[in-house]
Image: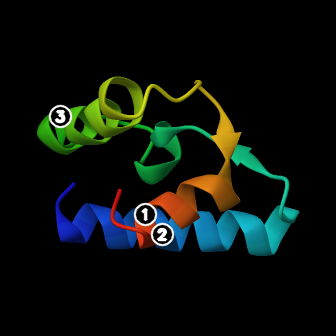
Amino acid sequence: MRPDLRHKAIAVCDRKIAQKGENVGLSFYAFFANRNDDPDLLMEAATWWIKTHQLDHFEKAAKIREMLHAGR
């Protein structure tokens, strides 16, 4: 995952956790606006989430943040 997407995803996880607590779930769609303005970046996130790590549609934001910090 490219560094700018990784930083953006971590920021989204941090924001969601701050708003709703440690048990909040999210999908990779949370990293994007409601419209698909960057399909390549969306596919990169989807590939990381679905194909590389075989994650469920919704995962705990804390788990995703930990994975991103670990460079996975």
| Residue depicted at x 47% and y 40% | 28
* Secondary structure under the numbered disc 2 in the rendered image: helix
Q: Amino acid at mark 2?
A: Ile
Residue 7 horizontal/vertical position (percent): 35, 73
Task: Give the residue number, with chain letter if any, for mark 2.
Answer: 10
Circle 3 Cα neighbour tier, 10 Å, few/some/many (<14 / 14–19 / ≥20): few
Q: Are marks 2 and 1 in contact (CB under 8 Å)?
A: yes
Q: Are marks 3 and 1 in contact (CB under 8 Å)?
A: no
Disc nearest the viewer among 2 and 3: 2
* Secondary structure under the numbered disc 1 in the rendered image: helix
Residue 32 horizontal/vertical position (percent): 40, 48
Task: Give the residue number, with chain letter if any, for mark 1.
Answer: 68
Who comes first in sequence, dot 2 or dot 1?
2
Residue 8 horizontal/vertical position (percent): 38, 68
Question: What's the CA distance linking mark 2 and mark 1?
Answer: 7 Å
Q: Amino acid at mark 1?
A: Leu
Who comes first in sequence, dot 2 or dot 3?
2
Task: Give the residue number, with chain letter if any, for mark 3.
Answer: 39
